[in-house]
Amino acid sequence: MALSLSSVTQHCQQQCLSHVSSSLFPTPSSHFRIISLRHPCLYRRAGVSVLCLSQYQVSVANGRTNGKVVRLGLPSKGRMADDTLELLKDCQLNVRQVNPRQYVAEIPQLSNLEVWFQRPKDIVKKLVSGDLDLGIVGFDTVSEHGQGNEDLIIVHDALEYGDCRLSLAIPKYGIFENVTSIRDLAQMPQWTAERPLRVATGFSYLGPKFMEENGLKHVKFSTADGALEAAPAMGIADAIMDLVSSGTTLKENNLKEIEGGVVLESQAVLAASRKALIQRKGVLDATNEILERLEAHLRAVGQFTVTANMRGSSAEEVAERVLSQPSLSGLQGPTVSPVFCKRDGKVSPDYYAIVICVPKKALYKSVQQLRAIGGSGVLVSPVTYIFEEEAPRWRQLLSKLGL
């Protein structure tokens, strides 16, 4: 017999484990969990699992109790996890964990948001199931475990870390010595129903899909994780399909990539549940703020503000001189303002200050051009954020959602 909401609440109170009231639950449910951080005690009675804790954070097994809480999934470990936290910190979104062993955290700047640390593939699966609203993972992970699900939507497709490619690689020697393209591989007569091309990979969805699209009909996949480069040399596979960054590991194991063999290019992305964005209150607003901060920071990376003083007869004359140089146009053009000096008891604008924004790769050239047209006292400082009138990807997101 299923326990009622009131009986479970009464049981918790009697055990003095947590001060739980029925007001914490939006609707009666016979299957729910009460989650907290101290004095855990798990009870299983009549199909009900109750974990009572002093801080009485509450979640429902098949739905959230608080519809205003937005859940963001982040990688729990590894380089991707470290880079993700660093990016959020640079965007003034500091993830705060009370205990590093906890899987739940918060971002103080977003009061209605919870952070859940998960394995990347679980982030994607929970976006699909509705247990998470947003998630930061690699595009390869979204593609492999999302499997084309229409509810998954890419909010930001280029967070500029985690760069790699999913690629097919074959040995440099033997029957593959003269194979240089996916077309060559598909036309090899060796592959038959009795003797298929054996491919070792951890991508059981993207792998078969890619091979079929490229005309390779006789292929046998073996699922594997890590150290795939050794598979051909050991004789347990003819080729591998794996993530590649620099390609050095492939070369060191006598493997090569081939033309047309790249399945996809990947980097970290911000993904979301389409349903959550449209239906769940607060998710779209939180997404907008996260997107604004990401866009502003990423646009500013590698940009510098250059300020210089320049003699001139007018702001227009100085601006014309600046715009005559190809590297000095800035984002929309130079800002020119008078610098007032006092001479012979009179205040006059003998100089004009110009301010431009230039990318790092053009910085020294821009300084040289400024000097060439009379610039002096050149000051250079890095740019932290560049906020547009509206984040470009925000408009794209609304279009995808039909809003």
Image: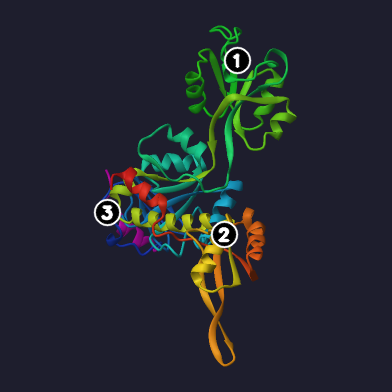
Q: Is residue 297 magenta?
A: no
- Which of pointers 1 and 3 lies earlier in the amino acid sequence? 3
Q: How many marks?
A: 3
Which of label 1 and label 3 is nearer to you?
1
Label 3, residues with CA under 10 Å away: few <14, some 14-19, many ≥20: some
- In x, y percent, where is residue 54? 42, 63
- Residues shaded magenta: 1-16
- In x, y percent, where is residue 249? 70, 33
| Front position in the image: 46 or 227 | 227
Q: Residue at horizontal 47%, vertical 41%? A: 122
Name the residue type under label 1: Asp
SS under mark 1: helix
Label 1, residues with CA under 10 Å away: few <14, some 14-19, many ≥20: few
Name the residue type under label 2: Leu
Is 44 left, or right, of 186 in this rendering? left
Residue that carries the numbered disc 1 in the rendered image? 184
Q: Looking at the image, can residue 326 be seen?
A: yes
Residue that carries the numbered disc 2 in the rendered image? 328
Disc ID at residue 5: 3
Name the residue type under label 3: Leu
Q: CA distance from mark 2 to mark 1?
A: 49 Å
- In x, y percent, where is residue 266? 54, 38
